[in-house]
Image (spheres, rainbow, N blue to C red):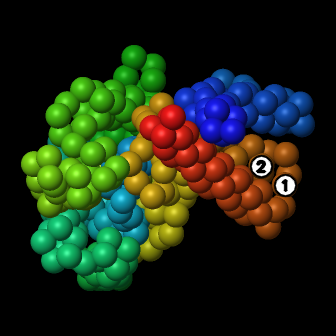
């Protein structure tokens, strides 16, 4: 009886182990179906546009994954993105000769400060992440309107060098894609091959046990929200450069899309688990859905329904897999 349960639950463990393979298979199948409906989908031009449009989402998803792994959530990233983008746009508008690198560093700095404030509120103040980030979301959004005086910064107010951050290329590859690849490589190493990376997983898996083992829980929480803020600030500069426009409501609600990419990529919303490889596939799937559904003339109303259904299925699948893995581990200990 116990052996049968272990055997059944081992299936869940195998699903968890090869989840990325299944997600990749679904992406390939979806691409084939869309290509059959519209032959322009798999053209080099469309693929380049799709990957470029997904780059900013994938960068934000890395930071959100770290936050979710520690059993947190960050609803302020869209507002942080808007604030950093607005401040950078206003700065380059006032100093057209400013090197774009300084604009990027300024945006990252704004994001780090914003994320650090949230990290302190949560780690030292003991405020629930959803409450802290919801409150700061409104504060950052209000600050964005305040620094801009409620006005937009349009393309003609930005120097060409700033807009080339997103439109330029390196070795024939768009800068946004290059930056996203660098972010993924850096954080892949950070998460999998550093002590702090392992501590992040430990805090999310079992906070009480992590504290007993001597891990500074508050420091880890402060770190992940600061990193999330820094990536949001970077994304803000890239966003404004790409769309050549900075507005008070930039990226409003975008945090939900980022969370969706994490969930689709297998990041456990209850914390403790998540992989960079799955995260990348989840971001790509969101990018494909955003690009493909309009190409095959799916109604905008059905687009939302389809995306929501896929996300819901992913959440249910994650929950079932986690339950199976936990039961499998429990049964093995009892045998």
The location of residue 25, given as percent across then percent down, is: 71, 28
Q: Is residue 331 left or right of residue 226?
A: right
- How far apart in space, not on screen, are marks 1 and 2 (Cα)? 5 Å
Q: For the residue labelled by badge 1, is the local secondary structure a helix, a strand or a loop?
A: loop
The x and y percentages for residue 85 are: 31, 60
At a point 30% along the width and 29% down the height, the residue shown is 192
* Residue at 77% across, 35% down: 30
**Number of marks in picture:** 2
Q: Is residue 244 visible?
A: no
User: Relative to 135, is 268 on the left or the right?
Assistant: right
Name the quadrant of the N terminus.
Answer: top right
> Mark 1 or 2 closer to N-term?
2
- Mark 1 vs 2: CB contact within 8 A: yes
Tell me, for residue 46, which label it has, or none: none
Q: Which residue bears the numbered disc 2?
A: 293
Check disc 1 and report the residue beneath it. Answer: 298
Relative depth, front residue between 115 and 222: 222
- Taking 110 as reference, is 60 above or below it? above
* Residue 129 is at least partly visible in this image: yes
Secondary structure at numbered mark 2: helix
Residue 320 location, x and y as percent? 63, 50
Q: In the picture provided, is 243 more to the left or to the right than 184?
A: right
Query: Residue drawn 63% across and 38% down?
Result: 2
When asked about the image quadrant of residue 72, the answer is: bottom left
């Amino acid at each position: 009886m116990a052996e049968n349960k272990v055997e059944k639950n081992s299936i869940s463990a195998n699903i968890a182990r090869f989840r990325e393979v299944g997600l990749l298979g679904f992406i390939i199948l979806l691409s084939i179906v869309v290509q059959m409906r519209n032959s322009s989908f798999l053209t080099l031009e469309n693929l380049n546009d799709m990957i470029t449009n997904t780059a900013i989402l994938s960068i934000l998803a890395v930071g959100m994954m770290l936050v979710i792994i520690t059993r947190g959530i960050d609803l302020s990233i869209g507002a942080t993105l808007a604030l950093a983008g607005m401040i950078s746009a206003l700065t380059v508008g006032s100093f057209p000769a400013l090197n774009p690198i300084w604009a990027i560093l300024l945006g990252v700095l704004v994001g780090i400060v914003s994320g650090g404030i949230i990290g302190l509120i949560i780690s030292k103040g003991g405020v629930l992440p959803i409450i802290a980030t919801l409150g700061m979301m409104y504060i950052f959004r209000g600050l964005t309107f305040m620094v801009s005086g409620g006005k937009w910064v349009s393309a003609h107010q930005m120097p060409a060098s700033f807009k080339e951050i997103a439109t330029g290329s390196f070795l024939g590859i768009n800068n946004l894609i290059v930056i996203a690849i660098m972010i993924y490589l850096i954080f892949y190493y950070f998460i999998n091959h550093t002590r702090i990376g392992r501590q992040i997983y430990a805090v999310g898996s079992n906070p009480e046990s992590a504290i007993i083992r001597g891990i500074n829980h508050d420091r880890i929480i402060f770190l992940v929200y600061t990193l999330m803020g820094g990536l949001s600030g970077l994304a803000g500069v890239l966003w404004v450069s790409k769309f050549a426009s900075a507005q008070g409501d930039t990226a409003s609600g975008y945090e939900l899309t980022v969370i969706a990419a994490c969930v689709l990529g297998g990041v456990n919303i209850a914390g403790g688990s998540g992989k960079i490889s799955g995260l990348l596939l989840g971001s790509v799937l969101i990018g494909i859905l955003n690009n493909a559904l309009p190409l095959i003339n799916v109604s905008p109303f059905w687009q939302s329904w389809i995306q929501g259904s896929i996300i819901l299925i992913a959440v249910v699948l994650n929950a079932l897999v986690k339950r199976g893995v936990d039961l499998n581990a429990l049964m093995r200990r009892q045998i």
